[in-house]
Image (cartoon, grey):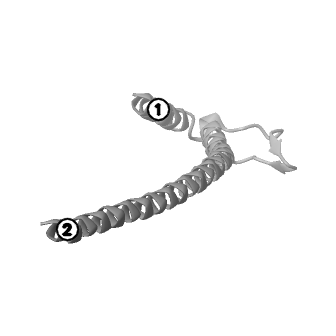
Amino acid sequence: MITFFGLLVLVLAAIVAVVGVLTNAGSGHAVGSDFGIFGMHLVRASTGQLFFGGILVGIIGMLGLIMLFSAITRRISSRSSRRELKETRRETEALKEERDQIASQLKVERGRREAAEAKVTQATQDTQETAPNAT
C-alpha cells in the first residue's frame, strides 16, 4: 500500500515538474541578470530552465539521502545479524554439549544392559547345566 502511494506521489511530482518547465519556457520568462549561482550569472536561462535545474538538484539530493539511509539500515541490520549469529553459536555449543552428555549416558546405560544380559545369560547357562545333573 505504501508503495502504491509512493508511486502516486512520484507520478504527481513528475506531472507538476513537466507543467512547471513547459509553462515557464521561452524568452517571455527570462531570468534577470542579477541571478547567479556560485559566481555564475544565468543570463540566457528562463524560469522553466531554472525550475528544471531545481528539479535536478532535488533528485540528486534525494539520491544522496537514499544512499545514506540505505547504508544506515544495512549497518543496523548487519549488527542485529551478528548478534543473532553469536546467539545461535552459543545455542549450538550448548546443544553439542547436551548431545555429548546424552551420548555418554547412553554408552554407560548400554554397558550396564550388556553386563546385565551377560549375567542373565550366564545364570541361564548355569541353570541348564545343573538341571540335567539333577535328573
**What is the x, y in percent for residue 27?**
61, 40
Classify 10 Å Cα crowding around label 1: few (below 14), some (14-19), many (20 and above).
Answer: few
The image's mark for residue 120 is none
Given residues 33 and 49, the one toward you in this image is: 49
Residue found 63% across the figure and 38% down from its top: 51
Residue found 54% across the figure and 56% down from its top: 101
Whether residue 133 sits left or right of residue 9 in the image: it is left
**What residue does disc 1 label?**
6
39 shown above or below 1: below
In the picture, residue 128 is in which quadrant? bottom left
Quarter of the figure with the C terminus: bottom left
Q: Secondary structure at mark 2?
A: helix
Between tags 1 and 2, which lies in front?
2
**What is the x, y in percent for residue 12?**
45, 30
Whether residue 87 sits left or right of residue 22 in the image: it is right
* Residue type for callout 2: Gln
**What residue does disc 2 label?**
128
In the picture, residue 21 is in which quadrant? top right
**What is the x, y in percent for residue 109?**
44, 57
